[in-house]
């Protein structure tokens, strides 16, 4: 398909098309075996490929490493070094385990490091989940609610450490119950103004230059996906009740409820294309969290909600979010794929509450197979939102 399309655009984009031909010429034609970017470089450099059949029999680890460069309204031009390590913990190969480690530095002197882990220990029927982060993050915030405006922006600077570590026990096939410790620590919080609507909202929820939310979480999870990096079917549900306690160091006692639901199906059923659905909902059940710990777009476990908007663009006590994405192949060997997506979110002041404002986002993206053994794609997405919001988003693995 690509080989037929490229010549049509040659007159308008000659240099781009030449580069594409050099890189992707080996994938043209009726190739059916899955190939990744390493296979293409081997062909270009005329290197002898490794024995794929031997490698597929192993448990890994399978590494994907990528230096990346992108642009977003929140961070400007950003350089990143991202890694993904996938492996099986037993010969049954029931579920892939995965560890992502990423480092970023932006044009606006922001830097942050994240590590996310999903490890399945089949023999003990355990699932270990971790989300560890460190941020030094001068950025903008826009206040509380769905009606927040770009004109009411306030610059804010802070350091942030997140430590979420959960342990699940399989109580039935694909059903897990777990307990965890969740810490959100912000310090050196500084605003560039002491007046305005957003500043007053921050002061209502934030006391001083430091905030701590520390709690024990109770978790329920259903997951029958074989590979969370790139699901080809199945469903996922995660429900988390998190009470934060002053005796654990929290500024105050407050409780939250997280409901994360996902479903994947082949569409059409005879194809390799996937139609994916995601519902992510975060509720404040009692008392009030610190401003920087309130439910917010872009602050989920993998920072993927709200493509088309900067993280923190919409913040409030209760967040409702839905997204759908259609993933399709562009080449017969699975080297290239594409996606189109749409999302919608709203902020509710209290529960229950009438739904008044829905904020849409949409976009498209390219997928490049980085590792065919773990089925890891490089995801490059461009998202749009209302009010001229837009941005380029990178991921190792699918967004959800």
Image: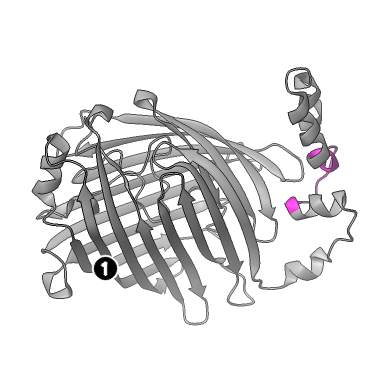
Residue at x 85%, y 61% (from the top left corner): 49
Q: Out of 16 and 57, give the one closest to the viewer.
A: 16
Q: In the visual, does 257 lie left or right of 286? A: right
Left or right: residue 391 compared with residue 37? left
- Front residue of 298/19: it is 19
The image shows residue 374 at horizontal and vertical percentages of 64, 60
Position of residue 22 measured from the top left corner of the image (x, y, whole percent): 83, 39
Residue found farthest to the bottom: 124
Residue 33 falls inside the magenta stretch: yes
* The image quarter in which residue 333 lies: top right
Q: How has the structure been colored for display?
A: one colour
Q: Is residue 242 above or below residue 128?
A: above
Q: Magenta region: which residues?
A: 24-37
328 to 87, vertically: above or below: above
SS for callout 1? strand
Circle 1 Cα neighbour tier, 10 Å, few/some/many (<14 / 14–19 / ≥20): some
Q: Nearer the viewer, residue 107 or 46?
A: 107
């Amino acid at each position: 398909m690509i080989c037929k399309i490229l010549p049509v655009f040659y007159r308008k984009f000659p240099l781009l098309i030449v580069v594409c031909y050099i890189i992707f010429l080996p994938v043209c034609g009726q190739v059916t075996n899955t190939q990744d970017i390493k296979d293409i470089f081997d062909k270009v450099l005329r290197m002898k490929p490794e024995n794929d059949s031997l490698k597929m029999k192993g448990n890994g680890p399978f590494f994907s490493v990528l230096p990346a460069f992108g642009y977003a309204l929140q961070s400007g031009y950003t350089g990143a070094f991202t890694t993904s390590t996938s492996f099986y913990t037993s010969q049954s190969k029931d579920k892939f385990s995965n560890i992502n480690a990423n480092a970023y530095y932006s044009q606006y002197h922001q830097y942050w490091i994240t590590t996310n882990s999903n490890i399945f220990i089949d023999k003990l029927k355990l699932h270990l989940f971790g989300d560890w982060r460190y941020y030094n993050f001068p950025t903008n915030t826009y206040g509380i609610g769905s009606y927040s405006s770009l004109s009411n922006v306030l610059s804010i600077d802070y350091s942030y450490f997140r430590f979420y570590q959960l342990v699940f026990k399989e109580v039935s096939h694909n059903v897990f119950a777990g307990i965890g410790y969740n810490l959100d620590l912000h310090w050196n919080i500084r605003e560039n103004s002491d007046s305005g609507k957003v500043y007053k909202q921050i002061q209502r929820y934030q006391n001083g230059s430091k905030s701590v939310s520390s709690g024990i979480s109770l978790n329920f999870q259903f997951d029958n996906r074989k590979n969370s990096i790139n699901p080809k079917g199945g469903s996922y549900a995660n429900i988390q009740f998190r009470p934060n306690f002053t005796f654990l160091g929290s500024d105050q006692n407050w409780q939250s409820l997280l409901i994360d639901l996902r479903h994947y199906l082949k569409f059409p059923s005879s194809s390799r294309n996937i139609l994916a659905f995601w519902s992510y909902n975060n509720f404040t059940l009692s008392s009030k969290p610190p401003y920087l710990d309130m439910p917010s777009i872009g602050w989920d476990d993998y920072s993927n909600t709200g493509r088309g908007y900067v993280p923190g663009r919409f913040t409030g006590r209760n967040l409702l979010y839905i997204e759908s994405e259609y993933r399709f192949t562009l080449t017969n060997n699975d080297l290239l794929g594409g996606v189109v997506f749409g999302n919608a979110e709203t902020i509710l002041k209290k529960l229950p509450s009438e739904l008044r404002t829905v904020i849409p986002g949409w976009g498209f993206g390219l997928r490049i197979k980085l590792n065919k053994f773990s089925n890891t794609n490089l995801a490059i997405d461009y998202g749009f939102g209302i009010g001229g919001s837009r941005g380029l988003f990178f991921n190792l693995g699918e967004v959800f």
